[in-house]
Amino acid sequence: MADIDSLKPRLVAERIRHSEDLGKLVRRVRTEQELLQTDLAGLAGTGNRFIVDLERGKPTLQLQKVLDVLDLMGLEVVIQRKGTIRI
């Protein structure tokens, strides 16, 4: 039987200052979800190249497609002023 804590969504809160930071986060969460890049691309309706570029931190990707992939992965973008703490 699953432990109750293992059923709770894992909190992922990280500062993203560069496209490479976002790429590393996407790769880590994708592997935690036991998805291959091709799996994620298929689920997101994108080409595999888009996922590869996202994980490499390509800075010129289409923002809406990036947001759609993040949403599909159970992630969201939160914007806040620098120096504030979000609980």
Image (spheres, rainbow, N blue to C red):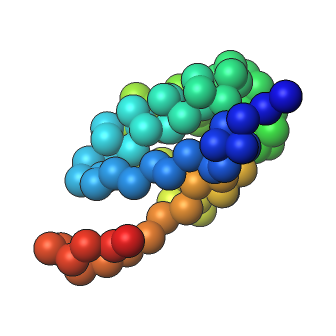
Q: Quadrant of residue 34?
A: top right
**Residue at the right extreme of this rendering:** 1
Q: How many marks?
A: 0
**Residue at the left extreme of this rendering:** 83
Which is nearer the eye, 81 or 62?
Answer: 81
Can residue 12 be seen in this snapshot?
Answer: yes
Can residue 41 be seen in this snapshot?
Answer: no
Image quadrant occupied by the C terminus: bottom left
Q: Percent from the top left, x then y, of residue 49?
A: 60, 27
* Side (left or right) of 4 relative to 50: right
* Side (left or right) of 53 relative to 82: right
The residue under the point 50% across, 38% down is 26
Image quadrant occupied by the N terminus: top right
The residue under the point 14% across, 73% down is 83
The residue under the point 66% across, 49% down is 8
Q: Percent from the top left, x then y, of residue 66?
A: 56, 52
Q: Percent from the top left, x then y, of residue 52?
A: 53, 26
Q: Is residue 24 above or below residue 22?
A: above
Which is nearer the eye, 86 or 18?
Answer: 86
The residue under the point 70% across, 24% down is 35
